Amino acid sequence: MSIQNRIETAVKNGFLTLYDAEIPTVEFQATRKEFEGDITVVVFPMLRYKKGNPVQIGNDLGNYIIENIEEVIRFNVVKGFLNLVVNDVLYLDAFKSIYTNDTYGFVKPSNNNDAVLVEYSSPNTNKPLHLGHVRNNLLGYSVAEIIKASGKKVYKTQIINDRGIHICKSMLAWQKYGKEETPASTGLKGDKLVGNYYVKFDQEYKQEITQLIAEGKTEEEAKKQAPLLLEAQEMLKKWEAGDEKVIELWKTMNAWVYAGFETTYKNLGVDFDSYYYESNTYLLGKDNIEEGLKNGVFFKKEDGSVWIDLTEDGLDEKIVLRSDGTAVYMTQDIGTAIQRSKDYPDVNGMVYTVGNEQDYHFKVLFLILKKLGYTWADELFHLSYGMVDLPSGKMKSREGTVVDADELMAEMTSTAKALSQELGKLDGYSEKEKEALYNTIGLGALKYYILKVDPRKRILFDPKESVDFQGNTGPFIQYTYARIQSILRKATFDHSQEISGIELHEKEKELIKIIENYPEVIQLAAANHSPALIANYTYDLVKEFNSFYQNVSILGEENQDKKTLRVQLSKKVSDIIKSAFSLLGINVPERM
């Protein structure tokens, strides 16, 4: 049991014994440097359960703890803060149980009916993945891994937007200008080839608009009457009617895109357990709307359109079926959520990784599902995130100015290569080993830079800044991990035995305290859907280790027991770095 857990149990028991009252939680904080103590209990929150002088309550609890935990040797109370001085034995006992736990911080799933479905990526099949998709994928994948580590079963999924006018634009442009090009004949990834024709459509469409305006049309008329757009609309009608030739072309071009996406996902290090396709789901939800009409959840207007009135909930009226009976996006999102609950009966919650421009949409969706009576709707979460900007400005996919995900990853590897060569520490590496290292550093830099920021915040992503080997960056943490591996390779003696009866250095105590926090950080990150908590904890751990490394001798220590403990501490820190970074989808190098 950790130091904090033992003290928390004693505080709760003490409060019950002394005041005949229960407190649900105990708040801790680091002891301020000007006061003596190893851990501080905050008394003020307890006043809700027992009126009184916080100093007196602190003294009462301090005396109770000393009587019941022999390793707590003295205490002092400053206002509402109970500062406890802990014997080194308690630190060593706590670390002993941590050191031998190979899955430290991770919880095995205990409830088979408490799974979570996490949706992320969800691209359109008319263009390659771009920088915005990178943040989406990294967030969704990491949150899924963190929730899994917290003790729940997780399913990773996505819904692919593979239908609609934008898909037909790429198809039509390829048909008219493609000259039978294929990924094989051009050497291009399929998603890039199809994306090029999406851009080509926009270029030709704009030329037609310009021509129509020159012929006397208004801009609005020109946009609607441009022949290319009318052809695309006609193609969409044929697709919806099941035209064999259109469907065959659609399947062929989508297959090119999916192959391209899979390459990007593999390089990015993300995966999925299942895929949903909008071409299969776009008709879902209509039956649910009919059911909701019977139950009074929805109402029909004079024109036949179906709505829901959410004004009493602080929102507005929302359409769920058009007057001609066709669905809107909300309709199919309702149907898809319900379908997923049937596909995964053990799912008791869903996480949607979607940009913050859809905040209102998800408020409405979740509320509708609750009103339809689905109990799992209380456990729906919109993992809302801000845009990613580059110093060069915004991205526009129609104009071909998007920051391509594959090119960004290649640039990160190239940047890592340049900086690593400047440092000149790769003697003895083969070219293959060097390239693998550059990739590990470059992708680690990209992922960490994006994930260390609260998902809700907008990011200005600077590739060069992210690959800095100093400060709160992925490479800095990776370098510390590699440094520890070097220490462990040199520690050729047996350092597996239990250590007791030694006096601890202050830096050893600080390191054990932050190591102890790891399981709690995972639970907090899962509850808050925030990889940033994992990233910044890891940085704090690394800073604490580097302070330890600079202030105590590890392999140069003469006392064998102290040397063994310091090697063990180093190893556990590296284990946690590797474990925490795995939750962020980041690899760590054995040498740097």
Image (cartoon, rainbow, N blue to C red):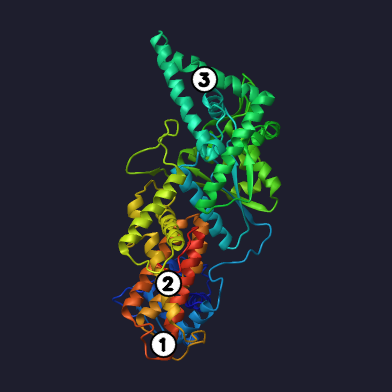
Q: Nearer the viewer, residue 379 or 237?
A: 237
Q: Is residue 388 above or below residue 110?
A: above
Q: Residues within 10 Å of mark 1 (few under 14, many from 20)?
A: many
Q: Specify the label residue 229 is tagged with.
A: 3
Q: Nearer the viewer, residue 123 or 40?
A: 123
Of the numbered discs 1 and 2, the one sitting upstream in the chain is: 2
**Type of residue at label 2?**
Ile
Q: In the rendered image, which residue does mark 1 sit on?
A: 562
Of the numbered discs 3 and 2, the one sitting upstream in the chain is: 3
> Is residue 463 shown to the viewer in this render?
yes
Q: In the rendered image, which residue does mark 2 sit on?
A: 514
> Is residue 456 shown to the viewer in this render?
no
Tell me if 175 is positioned left or right of 60 in this view.
Answer: right
Give SS at disc 1. Answer: helix
Of the numbered discs 3 and 1, the one sitting upstream in the chain is: 3
Q: Which residue appears at 64% of the width and 21% of the height?
A: 324
**Type of residue at label 3?**
Leu
Q: Nearer the viewer, mark 1 or mark 2?
A: 1
Q: Are marks 3 and 2 in contact (CB under 8 Å)?
A: no
Q: Position of residue 83 (x, y in %)?
A: 38, 77
Q: Position of residue 255 (x, y in %)?
A: 61, 38
Q: Nearer the viewer, mark 3 or mark 2?
A: 3
The Cα–Cα distance between marks 1 and 2, rounded to whole angstroms, is 19 Å
Q: Which residue appears at 71% of the width and 31% of the height?
A: 294
Give SS at disc 2. Answer: helix
The Cα–Cα distance between marks 3 and 2, rounded to whole angstroms, is 60 Å
Q: Which quadrant, please, contains the C terminus?
A: bottom left
The Cα–Cα distance between marks 3 and 1, rounded to whole angstroms, is 76 Å
Tell me if 443 is positioned left or right of 526 in this view.
Answer: left
**Type of residue at label 1?**
Lys
